């Protein structure tokens, strides 16, 4: 299980910059448009960073919950 967790965090860390660039270029722009309008920003850089961090944080939280459930399921 340790190898799976380490691999997951390695992949997550290596893919974040690429996902942020893709997200800032307009992929899933519906996620950061409300934030962009709220702060009246013309650039999509900071709103897309915020939503990318929230998305990766949610993925990490779900993964950690699943790891803990699996670890506690096997005595």
Image: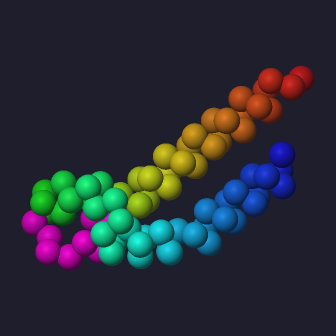
Q: Residue 33 lies in what quarter of the image?
A: bottom left
> Does residue 37 appear in the picture of this structure?
yes
Is residue 54 found left or right of 46 in the rendered image?
right
Residue 58 is situated, as x and y percent measured from the top left of the image, at 49, 46
Residue 47 is situated, as x and y percent measured from the top left of the image, at 27, 65
Q: Residue at x 29, y 54 (%)?
A: 31
Quarter of the C terminus within the rendering: top right
Please, which colouring scheme is shown? rainbow
Q: Residue at x 79, y 52 (%)?
A: 4
Q: 19 above or below 67?
A: below
Point out the residue furthest to the front here: 27
Q: Residue 37 lies in what quarter of the image?
A: bottom left
Q: 72 above or below 56?
A: above
Q: Residue at x 65, y 42 (%)?
A: 64
Magenta stretch containing residue 73, yes or no? no
Is residue 63 found left or right of 40 in the rendered image?
right
Point out the residue furthest to the right here: 75
Residue 71 is situated, as x and y percent measured from the top left of the image, at 80, 32
Marker count (numbered): 0
Is residue 15 found left or right of 54 in the rendered image?
right
Magenta stretch containing residue 44, yes or no? yes
Q: Residue at x 41, y 53 (%)?
A: 54
> Does residue 35 appear in the picture of this structure?
no
Residue sitting nearer the eye, 26 or 33: 26
The stretch of residues the image draws in magenta is: 40-50
């Amino acid at each position: 299980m340790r190898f799976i967790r380490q691999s997951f965090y390695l992949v997550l860390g290596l893919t974040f910059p690429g996902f942020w660039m893709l997200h800032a270029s307009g992929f899933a722009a519906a996620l950061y448009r409300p934030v962009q309008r709220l702060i009246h920003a013309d650039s999509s850089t900071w709103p897309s960073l915020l939503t990318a961090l929230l998305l990766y944080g949610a993925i990490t939280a779900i993964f950690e919950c699943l790891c803990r459930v699996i670890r506690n399921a096997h005595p």
